[in-house]
Image (cartoon, rainbow, N blue to C red):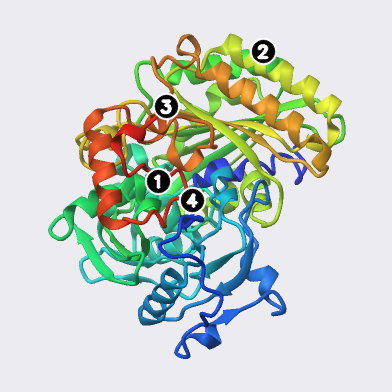
Amino acid sequence: MIGSTLLQAVPAALFFASTVTAIPYTRLYGRQSNYTWPSEVADQAYGPSWPQFVNKTTRWSTYEPPSFNEVFLPKTEEDLTIGLQYLSSAGKTFLAKSGGHGYSPTLHQIQNAAMINLENFDHVNMNSDFSVTVGTGARFSKLVDVVGNSGRELTVGACPCVGAMGAMLGGGLGRLQGIHGLTSDAVRSARVALWNGTIVDASADTNQDLFWGLRGAGQNFGIVIEAVFETYSATNGGKQYSSDMTFSADKLEAVFDVTNRLLTPELDPTLSLAIAIGSNPQTLEPLILVNVVYPGPEKKGQEYARLYSNFSDSKTEQVTAWTNLANVALPSVVISGCPTGNQHNQYSVITRDLKTKDFREALESYRDFVHKYPTAKNSVIFIETFGQAGITAFPDDFSAFPHRHQFNNAVVFSMTYTDNSVADAADAWALQWRNHVAQPKVSGYDKLVIYQNYAHDDEPLSALYGYEQWRHERLSALKRKYDPHGLFNGYHAVPANVTNWS
């Protein structure tokens, strides 16, 4: 059996998540040392001597992190407006945190900043029309509880401790995407605080350009205070079949053969698969874990799982409520991966294909790496394979999310370690294998495709936001309009000048 410490690096991949709105060192004015917090919000701002300072500013990953010398915890929209007016006029660097799981090394440029901790905006309220209003501080766990207990559902990430709003900003993949599309596809409207504290609404009827950009590139334009999401009647009465299976390394070919058969010609829209290649914490030998989730009749779910379990070393299965799925699907991965403050360095790529030969080579290389660097034994190769029909049902220009026809498999090389002396070796290994799998002859795509929430810091921006010229022009125009001074440039910044696209 897999120990509780195995695969602790995976959840960042599950989170998909960036959960931040960022402001780097580009300043409207020079930093003004004589500025002080306005009296209306002074009691909501704290320095490093505050006993709760570390707790309120620590993020999920400490790899190439931002740093902070004060934290601001607004309680209302008005407080946030006053705080942003102060910070922008004082020329202070700041970073807004909803869930705090965004792990991109681009955040490292934010140093000695003010964190805007939005934990007080954690409301989740069902509306009379079955839509749900979600505050930017709410986690997926709370969103799922409220929506699920109302007999409804929507696409969410697999990890309950991730901030729902941050995941939405980059698109929002999840197990129900084959039915309902991305998390961001369900957004009806959003309320946004701009760089100078101005609060605007964005929807299909109001500030349509901003509404388009928030869904797929949303970290670039402001702080989403809250959003209204459409919800859907619970599939199969809210009951989902889930099975976890483990395999020895020699079964890799069999695991990938079954997976590729399920992908041909297209994955069942209601089926979701997750494959993790990790290591036994005692022997350091590779192990493979497969999770199957099916929100339909138990018998059909068992048929899917049986394709794998015929040669698995162990198997667990159950039918559970959607509200409880995170507790039973990959529990050694998801729940154990929630704690903040650990090193997580991740490279990823989206692929059309899962080439068995190349993943065999990756597993053997992973074996050698972990035996050489045992303090990195919780590093993993993680693959999420979810339905596509719900995503492709929307037109290509529906939102800023660019990968509607190129989103089959999210492959993540997630490096976690307890000894910083292995950091360079871990980075080099993950980068090498990301680049290998990204080759067109391996990935199946002719260009590099990167899910923005999973991006590192070395990819061309076009791989995150799309290669089409019209996308570049539209996003750059939004940047100039809503973030004219580049104050939200910390997280995979969209360039204001269209000629600066990579």
> For the residues carrying marks 4 and 1, which lies nearer the camera in this image?
4
**Chain-order first, disc 1 or disc 3:** 1
Classed neighbour count for the residue bearing mark 2: other residues with Cα under 10 Å, few (<14), some (14–19), many (≥20): few
Front-most of residues 483 and 346 = 483
- Residue 112 pos. (x, y %): 62, 63
Front-most of residues 449 and 300 = 449
Given contact means CB atoms under 8 Å apart, are the residues at marks 2 and 4 in contact?
no
- Residue 275 pos. (x, y %): 58, 30
Q: CA distance from mark 1 to mark 2?
A: 31 Å
Q: CA distance from mark 4 to mark 1?
A: 14 Å
Instruction: Give the left or right position of residue 305, taking residue 470 as reference.
Output: right
Q: CA distance from mark 3 to mark 4?
A: 21 Å
State the residue lying farthest toward the bottom: 39
Q: CA distance from mark 3 to mark 2?
A: 22 Å
> For the residues carrying marks 3 and 2, which lies nearer the camera in this image?
3
Does residue 478 show up?
Answer: yes
Given contact means CB atoms under 8 Å apart, are the residues at marks 1 and 2 in contact?
no
Q: Name the mark on residue 43.
A: none
Q: CA distance from mark 1 to mark 3?
A: 14 Å
Does residue 1 show up?
Answer: no
**Chain-order first, disc 3 or disc 4:** 3
**Chain-order first, disc 1 or disc 2:** 1
- Residue at 51% x, 56% y is 25
- Name the amino acid type tagged 2: Glu
Instruction: Give the left or right position of residue 436, taking residue 487 as reference.
Output: right
Q: Taking 264 as reference, is 299 above or below it?
A: below
Q: Name the mark on residue 449.
A: 3
Residue at the spot of label 1: 170
Residue at the spot of label 2: 361
> For the residues carrying marks 1 and 2, which lies nearer the camera in this image?
1
Residue at the spot of label 4: 490
